[in-house]
Structure formats: C-alpha cells, structure tokens
C-alpha cells in the first residue's frame, strides 16, 4: 500500500472524504488538517485573523512565525515521507507547489479533477490524471472485495 500526501485546500469540501476512503483502502495518508493526532493543521488565521490584507513584507515576515515554521515542518516532513501525492482540485498555490516538488522528487503524482476545473498544461507532469475518486482508488489499489464491503 502507498504512503500518500493529499494536497488540497482548507476550502475543498472533498478533501476529508478522499483522506477517509484512501485510509479505508489500507493506505497510510497524511492529512494536513490534522498532521498528527490531536494537532490541528496550520492556518494563516492563527497568526493574524487579518492575514488576507497583509503587505508583501508582512507575508514574508510571517513565514518565520513559530506557527508557520511548525506547519511547514509537518507538511514538508510528510512530503518527504510519502511516495505518492494526490492533488485534489480545486486548490490553491501551496498544493500545486507540493505536487510540483513531489513530481520533481520522482514520486508518483495524481491529479484528481472534475468537470468545471480550469485546465492546466503543467499537469502533464503528473503520473496520472483522474476524474473520479474511484479512478484514483483503482489506480492506487484497493483491498480485496471482502474488506471493501466495510465501506
């Protein structure tokens, strides 16, 4: 089974279900929303609720805030640990950087897209582009039929 880094966005309602189903299939899955047991994932709002109006220099400075440093360490460590990245669209720039880093590191990369998503040429670097979670799960491998019935 795979060690999977799911790259996506806090705003993507599909992400929790992707994590749950891949874990049910027997994969080890990193969840940026809970990077360790009882540890909430990083959010800029933890540093400053008005983060959306930061200047460029305030953003640069915030990258050195202890919460940002810790959040980066969790995510980067998980990217190094994983052998596979599943990018769940729609998502933002960070998730695309994560997939790009993993592709450059020679790891298996999968883009999960759906109707209505804007096409991206550089997605060609991904190992596979899937249009459903079932397609992702089939590509990664699922447990035997008896075990899958527990879904």
Image (cartoon, rainbow, N blue to C red):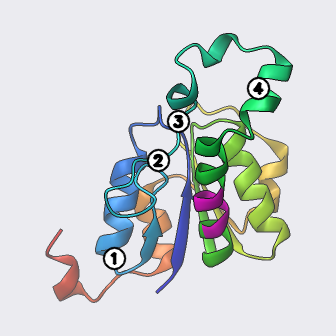
Mark nearer the N terminus (1 vs 4): 1
Q: Label 2 to label 4, Cα distance in Å?
A: 19 Å
The magenta segment: 73-77
Residue linked to disc 2: 41
**What numbered label is drawn on residue 43?**
3
Q: Label 1 to label 4, Cα distance in Å?
A: 39 Å
- Vertical arrangement, residue 49 with respect to residue 96, above or below: above
Residue linked to disc 1: 25
Tell me where residue 109 appears, x and y as whole percent: 68, 66
Determine whether, in the image, residue 4 is placed left or right of residue 147: right
* Quadrant the C terminus occupies: bottom left
Badge nearest the viewer, 1 or 2:
2
- Vertical arrangement, residue 97 with respect to residue 25, above or below: above
Tell me where residue 131 appears, x and y as whole percent: 53, 52
Residue linked to disc 4: 59
Mark 2 residue element: loop
Q: Main structural element of the magenta stretch: helix, strand or loop?
A: helix
Mark nearer the N terminus (3 vs 4): 3
């Amino acid at each position: 089974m795979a060690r999977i880094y799911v790259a996506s966005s806090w705003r993507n309602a599909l992400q929790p279900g992707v994590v749950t189903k891949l874990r049910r299939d027997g994969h080890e899955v990193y969840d940026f929303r809970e990077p360790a047991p009882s540890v909430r994932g990083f959010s800029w709002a933890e540093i400053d609720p008005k983060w959306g109006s930061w200047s460029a220099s305030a953003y640069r400075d915030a990258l050195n805030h202890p919460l940002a440093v810790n959040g980066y360490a969790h995510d980067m460590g998980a990217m190094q640990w994983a052998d596979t990245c599943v990018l769940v669209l729609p998502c933002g720039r960070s998730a695309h950087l994560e997939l790009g880093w993993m592709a450059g590191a020679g790891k298996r990369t999968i883009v999960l897209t759906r109707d209505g998503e804007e096409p991206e040429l550089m997605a060609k670097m991904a190992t596979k582009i899937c249009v459903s979670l079932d397609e992702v799960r089939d590509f990664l491998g699922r447990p035997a039929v008896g075990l899958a019935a527990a879904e």
